[in-house]
């Protein structure tokens, strides 16, 4: 599984670094900052990649809250988050909350699009 994240965002980088410390061999971490190959691999433009976390598992690309679920499912230390947030009503709330936070992080980091 490949995880596409924005390493130039301080908040994003801090969270992903927690996951990276778990050394899960099934996860490849891909920084989307100025990364044309990430755009090609995901068939997403820079704006879409910057807007939310994405994963690619096989040929399927998944973004947003669902991508976080799949990351947490792969990391034993964080599997409890997967178990809790996959509950339908909790997932719906989480998904909406994630979109709000992701939007504000996108606005904060939007200047990257001009590069």
Image (cartoon, helix red, strand yellow):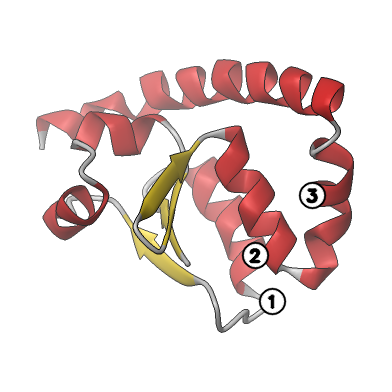
Q: Mark 2, residues whose alpha carbon is within 10 Å: few (<14), some, or many (≥20)? A: some
* Distance from the alpha carbon under mark 1 to that under mark 3: 16 Å
Q: Give residue 17's position: percent from left, percent from top.
A: 58, 63
Of badges 1 and 3, nearer the viewer stands 3
- Which quadrant holds residue 21? bottom right
Residue 53 point in image, percent of width and height: 47, 42
Is disc 1 surrounded by few (<14), some (14 to 19) or many (20+) residues within 10 Å? few
Cα separation, mark 2 vs mark 3, equals 14 Å
Residue 113: x, y in percent? 18, 31
Residue that extends furthest to the front in the rendered view of this protein: 59
For image coordinates 32% across by 39% down, the residue present is 49
* Circle on res. 105: none
Q: Are marks 2 and 3 in contact (CB under 8 Å)?
A: no
x 51%, y 26%: residue: 102
Q: In the rendering, which numbered label is found on residue 22?
A: 1
Q: Is residue 87 above or below residue 31?
A: above
Of residues 20 and 4, the one drawn nearer to the viewer in this rendering: 4
Q: Taking 30 as reference, is 100 above or below it?
A: above
Q: Mark on residue 19?
A: 2
- Mark 1 touches mark 2? (CB < 8 Å): yes
| Crowd band around label 3 with a 10 angstrom C-alpha radius: few (<14), some (14–19), many (20+) | many
Q: Judge left or right: residue 1 versus residue 59.
A: right
Left or right: 6, with 73 as reference point: left
Point out the tag, 2 or 3, that comes first from the N-terminus.
Answer: 2
Above-or-below relation of 60 to 103: below
Q: Quadrant of the C terminus?
A: top left
Nearest the viewer among 63 and 8 is 63
Closer to viewer: mark 2 or mark 3: 3
Residue, disc 3? 82
Answer above or below: position of 114 versus 78.
Answer: above
């Amino acid at each position: 599984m490949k995880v596409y994240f924005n390493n130039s965002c301080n908040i994003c980088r801090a969270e992903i670094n927690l996951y990276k410390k778990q050394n899960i061999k099934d996860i490849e971490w891909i920084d989307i900052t100025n990364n044309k190959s990430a755009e090609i691999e995901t068939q997403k433009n820079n704006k879409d990649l910057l807007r939310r976390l994405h994963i690619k598992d096989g040929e399927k690309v998944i973004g947003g809250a669902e991508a976080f679920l799949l990351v947490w499912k792969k990391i034993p230390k964080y599997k409890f988050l997967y178990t809790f947030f996959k509950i339908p009503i909790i997932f719906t709330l989480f998904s909406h909350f994630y979109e709000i936070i992701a939007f504000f992080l996108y606005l904060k980091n939007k200047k990257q699009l001009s590069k």
